[in-house]
Image: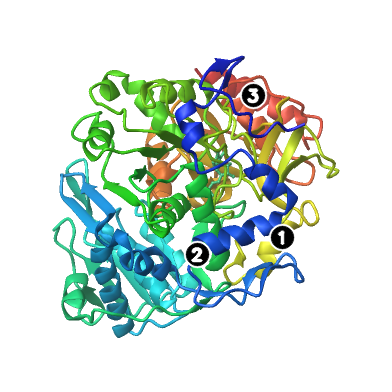
Amino acid sequence: MRKEGILENGRIENGVFYPPAEILEKANAKADIYELAKKDRLGFWDTQAKELVSWFKSYDKVLDDSNAPFYKWFVNGKLNMSYNCIDRHVKSDRRNKAAIIYESEIGKQVCLTYGMLYKLVNKFANALSGLGVKKGDRVVLYMPMIPEAAIAMLACTRIGAPHSLVFGGFSPDSLRDRINDCQAKVLITSDGNFRRGKPFPLKNNADKAMEDTPSIEKCVVVKNAGNEIDFVEGRDVWYHDLMAKAGNYYEPEPMDAEDMLFILYTSGTTGKPKGVVHTTGGYLVQIQSTLKYVFDIKEDDVYWCTADIGWITGHSYVVYAPLALGSTTFMYDGTIDYPDKDRIWEMAERYGVTKFYTAPTAIRTFMKWGVEYPKRHDLSAIKILGSVGEAINPEAWMWYYENIGGGQAPIMDTWWQTETGAFMCTPLPITPLKPGTATYPFPGIELDIIDEQKNPADEGYLVVKSPWPAMLRTVYGDDQRYIDTYWKHFGDCYFAGDGAKRDELGYIWVTGRVDDVLNVSGHRLGTAEVESALDECEEVAESAVVGKKHAVKGEAIHAFVILKDGFTGNAELIDKLRRHVGVKIGPIARPDDIVFISELPKTRSGKIMRRLLRDLAEGRAIGDVTTLADPGAINEIAATYLGKED
Ligand code: PRX
């Protein structure tokens, strides 16, 4: 039996952390929230939609499930994202409240009030419209973490032009493929941004990508780092030139609740990233509801989510949810140890950050550097902490709780995905916590753990049993792939790709991906993507990539490579292959280890047995080999391979 909402005073008992009285008393979430949502799930979302969204036209129905899995939420409702994130606050007492506070690595500071943001977004919407961008046109953003990125996102939503952000760490090839997949008309980028004090040439990468992107008509360039760039006459335009001429008001487009808001590419089990499509109404309802209750957003918060805007966390919880709630969101563009390893804490203190949300890989890095860095600063303003990207190991949880939260700030371990759009499994500030578990489904969300036969199980596959408002609607341009990837495995349940188990309190522990997807420092990468990059090299006959446990990154990429006859595996070749993957996908995808072997373990149907390769990579004796086509071969590989490893 689940025991939601056990409300007792801030104490630790049997490894369970009970929330402090002050949090319990003032939390947005009240003790009956789970019960209410359970009694009437759609009623719960209806209430959230009415309370949290300013609709131009109210919806006729909360959910239309007549064409599953193409669900529709808030049917026939009309709204606009940028109106909800800015206009309504400008008309209220929040007009002069800080909407975005930004600091760059080299110390440039910007504070945009809602009133200022309103003007900039309106101007940029006019500028984009002047470039021919209309409702439905796709716009790709390849941007650093600068306020102009948020301005551009909001301007796209004002027009109704779906945006697609490509993380600045991705290579020109990755950018090109994404632009071509969604046939974007305009690319927005910047000259560069600072990384450890040196400008990183983003526009050069964009230029390389645009050598082969026929759909791009214009490229808008934000002057940020001041580095030299090439400018293509007729195609490239400066952001500041456009803004100088742009009109002050752009009427927000009334969007249908189900109109596309954005596309975000994410890795899956094939070599080709999928364009995850999110729509407007349901997404706006769930991101706000989750942030309001989980991070307990209050009027005087300074909320800092460290995610890059190029990832879903940056979309939902750096830009859209905090602004829609009228909160203050902090953005930092830079490395976390520049000029020193206390940069994050120094800024958290200086800006009075009250809610702090980061990833376990960052926490483990901070742990490695030592407690002296956070200890240099007064972090007592922090009331709630958050974690996302992978399961947080209990040791990192404790360190975070004690050294950043001062033993007073509950940690919200939020499980969700690019596809889910918003938190799905997460504690609330009133939930008793256990280090390492994302605890319960958010109210109104139905999760389950099932076995191969679809029976409920204490350990197995994590599934979502019913549609949820912020869910993806399809894979861009490929409805069949949407069905095949997410809805085929277990009938009418959504399969997340993660394994999970449930403990005696009913808490859900996410145990990691059960498909061929890697999680490197919270970044999601497909093994197939890395393999196809390796296989392109003339020396490589075949490759197989697995994730190997890593103390800081969570998983490191470990590649097994079979060379073509006539080539020898040596340090030089390893270097070449690693570099090639970096160029092809981006530096995050470079394998940590590349090992040359003579044969890959395969099943009789030819499927690579990654489980065995993981055993090898992590230096374990190999497991069950009975399904292998040639069990002798793997024993031979293991003998030579394990002998070689440290
Ligand atoms: O494996 C889960 C892991 O990250 C995956 C989703 O990755 P992505 O779409 O890039 O989104 C990351 C940010 C939402 C999931 O399938 N994951 C994310 N958060 C957690 C997690 N695993 C365990 N616990 C979490 N809190």
Residue 99, how many percent across, how many down?
A: 30, 56
Mark 1: few/some/many CA within 10 Å (<14, 14-19, 20+): few
- Viewer-side residue, 478 vs 36: 36
Q: How far across and down, in percent of the image, does residue 391 sit?
A: 55, 33
Residue 5 vs 607, above or below: the answer is above
Which residue is the site of mark 3? 638
Specify the quadrant of the image occupied by residue 14. Answer: top right
Q: Tell me, for residue 484, which label it has, or none.
A: 1
Q: Which of marks 2 and 1 is nearer the N terminus?
A: 2
The residue under label 2 is 53
- Amino acid marked by disc 1: Asp
Residues packed near mark 2 inside 10 Å, few (<14), some (14 to 19) or many (20 plus): many
- Tag in front: 2 or 1: 2
Q: CA gap, disc 3 to disc 1?
A: 35 Å
Q: Residues within 10 Å of mark 3 (few under 14, many from 20)?
A: many
State the image quarter where residue 320 is shown. Answer: bottom left
Per the model, the C-alpha gap separating discs 2 and 1 is 33 Å
Looking at the rendered structure, the kind of residue marked 3 is Ala
Label 2 CB sits under 8 Å from any ligand 1 atom: no
Q: Which residue is drawn at 58% across and 55% down?
A: 419
Q: Is residue 317 visible?
A: yes
Instruction: Estimate the x, y position of residue 90 in percent, counting from the top left.
Output: 31, 66
The residue drawn where x is 35% and y is 85% is 132
User: How many tags in the picture?
Assistant: 3
